Amino acid sequence: MRGHRQLGSTGRTGGRGRDGGRGFGGGRGCEGGRAFGRTQNGAQNGAQNGAHSRAHSRARRRARDRGQVAIEYLGFLPILLLAALAGLQLGLAAYVAQQAGTAARAAARADTTDEPFPGGASAAGYASMTGWVRGRADVSVSGGVATVTVTIPQVVPFWDFDPVTKTATMPVPPDASDEEDLP
């Protein structure tokens, strides 16, 4: 009965005969429950078990695959980092534009109110910005029109933005001397 195939306990074809081969259990490896020990007809299949070597080769293949995934991740990491920096750069540009608009409105309002702001209308514009934006800003005020220009910090090395310029206009109240001349 050397060449005929035997049915294993799962109903699948098992080993090649009495002298070893794949053993019983359908060739599923160690998880088949009968990878080591004796087969149904008494043959020892320990070291000659092909299922064990297949399971071992699958484990080696999985270990190689894990290394391949790590290399693919390292290749994708610069692209992911660049996308994150681009998002940060756009958010920073929007924040600087918002701060410039707030400073322009504050400076124009301070220029047109009856009560002068300590240090002048330009100081009101500078005071309305956060510290790191204030250091990059230029505020100019004249006749109720305030213009604020802020340079945007560069996060992405090759991506440069023009400075943000915001202007605000407030109505100038009439002088008290002009009211006396009216009929």
Image (cartoon, rainbow, N blue to C red):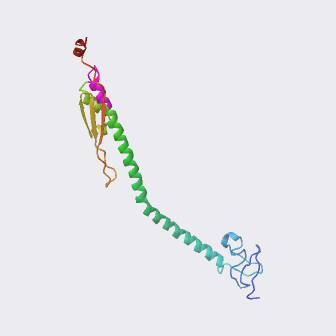
Which percent across, then down, holds residue 89?
Answer: 36, 48
Residue 18 location in percent, x, y? 74, 84
Q: Main secondary structure of the magenta part?
A: helix
**x 52%, y 66%: residue:** 66
Q: Is residue 126 above or below residue 77?
A: above
Q: Nearer the viewer, residue 141 or 96?
A: 141
Residue range highlighted in magenta: 105-117
Q: Which of the two residues, 114 or 91, is positioned nearer the viewer here?
A: 114
Tell me the quarter of the image containing the C terminus.
Answer: top left
Extreme-bottom residue of the structure: 2
Does residue 23 lie above or below 96 as drawn? below
Quadrant housing residue 97: top left
Horizontal side of 109 relative to 31 (left or right) equals left
- Tell me the quarter of the picture where residue 173 sits: top left
Residue 9 at x, y = what percent?
A: 77, 74
Q: Does the magenta run of residues contain 113?
A: yes
Q: Is residue 11 left or right of residue 75?
A: right
Residue 4 in the figure: left or right of residue 107: right
The N terminus lies in which quarter of the figure? bottom right
Using the image as rendered, state which of residue 75 and residue 55 is in the foreground: 75
Left or right side of 43 for 77: left
The percent position of residue 105, horizontal first and vertical second, equals 32, 31
Q: Nearer the viewer, residue 35 or 73?
A: 73
> Where is 42 relative to 177, above or below?
below
Instruction: Kindly identify the residue that appears in the image at 66 percent across and 73 percent down.
Output: 29
Question: Does the magenta portion include 136?
Answer: no
